[in-house]
Image: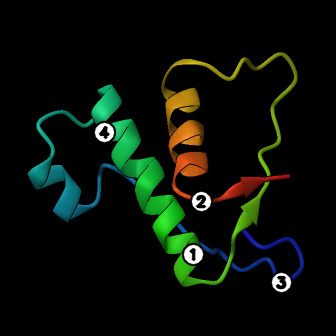
């Protein structure tokens, strides 16, 4: 979501019809990588090349969340 305009820049979910039918598993690490890549691609299409992630107090960035965030970084989005 864009802070200034409150406009949603990109959304991706494994519940989308095209992903739900094409992914062997909707919850494995491969699905996390697909979601991260889609978020990065959709952000670039909206001319957004930097984003931030605000952790909830005590939240650890690991596992599936870590995979999604790392994939977004690998696909050219800068975290500030």
Q: Nearer the viewer, mark 2 or mark 1?
A: 2
Question: Quadrant of the rendered structure where residue 69 is?
Answer: top right
Question: Which percent across, then down, holds residue 68?
Answer: 51, 39
N-terminal of the pair, mark 3 or mark 1, is: 3
SS state under label 1: helix
Where in the figure is residue 10, as x and y percent of width and height?
Answer: 55, 69
Q: For marks 4 and 1, give the CA distance.
A: 20 Å
Rounded to the nearest whole Å, what is the CA distance between mark 3 and mark 4? 30 Å
Q: Residues within 10 Å of mark 3 (few under 14, many from 20)?
A: few
The earlier-in-sequence mark between 4 and 1 is 4
Which quadrant: the N terminus? bottom right
Left or right: 37 in relation to 17: right
**Could you say which disc has been placed on residue 76 in the image?**
2
Q: Measured from the top left, where is residue 36 in percent x and y?
A: 47, 49
Per the image, label 2 sits on a secondary structure element best described as loop
Residue at the disc numbered 4: 31
Q: Are marks 2 and 1 in contact (CB under 8 Å)?
A: yes
**Would you name the residue on which mark 3 appears?**
5
């Amino acid at each position: 979501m864009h802070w200034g305009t409150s406009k949603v820049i990109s959304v991706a979910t494994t519940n989308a019809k095209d992903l739900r039918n094409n992914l062997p598993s909707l919850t494995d690490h491969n699905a996390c990588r697909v979601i991260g890549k889609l978020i990065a691609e959709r952000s670039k299409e909206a001319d957004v090349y930097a984003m931030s992630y605000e952790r909830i107090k005590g939240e650890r960035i690991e596992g599936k969340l870590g995979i999604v965030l790392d994939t977004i970084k690998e696909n050219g989005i800068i975290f500030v």
